[in-house]
Image (cartoon, rainbow, N blue to C red):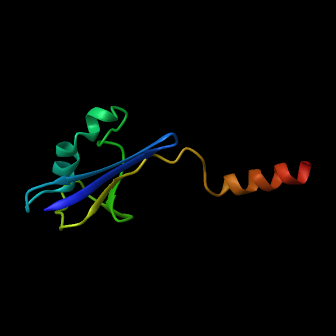
Amino acid sequence: MQIGVVYSEPDQQIWLNIEVPDTATIREAIERSGILGQCPQIDLDTQKVGIFGKLSKLDAPLKPGDRVEIYRPIIVDPETAPRKDRMESAEE
């Protein structure tokens, strides 16, 4: 079956369409895709993964057409970021 594996950094986006066995899991798809070689910064032990925006476990089975997503860690508190923007606007 065909699935996609995606990963995004601020300066690059990778979307790989690959063929995997019908019994493939998220981990197997990521490993087969070769993305770990292209992006050595990916750490599956710490980074979250999902299918179509829904968090999933590495051993979750895949269905044809699934999009496996590898998520980067959040480095800015989403509640603080908008407040910072408003404060900068007020100072101008």
The residue shown at (26%, 33%) is 37
Residue situated furthest right in the rendering: 92
Q: Nearer the viewer, residue 73 or 68?
A: 68
Q: Viewed as shown, does residue 32 lie left or right of 57?
A: left
Identify the image quadrant of residue 63. bottom left
Residue 18 screen position, x and y as percent = 20, 52
Find residue 69 and report its horizontal and vertical position in percent.
34, 55
In this figure, what is the number of numbered marks?
A: 0
Q: Nearer the viewer, residue 19 or 50?
A: 19
Rendered image quadrant of residue 68: bottom left
Q: Position of residue 56 (x, y in %)?
A: 29, 61
In the displayed structure, 56 sits above or below 75; it is below
Q: Residue at x 68, y 52 (%)?
A: 81
* Depth order, front residue of 60/3: 3
Above or below residue 84? Residue 65 is below
Identity of the residue drawn at 61% across and 55% down: 78
Q: Quadrant of the N terminus?
A: bottom left
Q: Position of residue 90 (x, y in %)?
A: 89, 54
> Which residue: 19% across, 51% down?
29
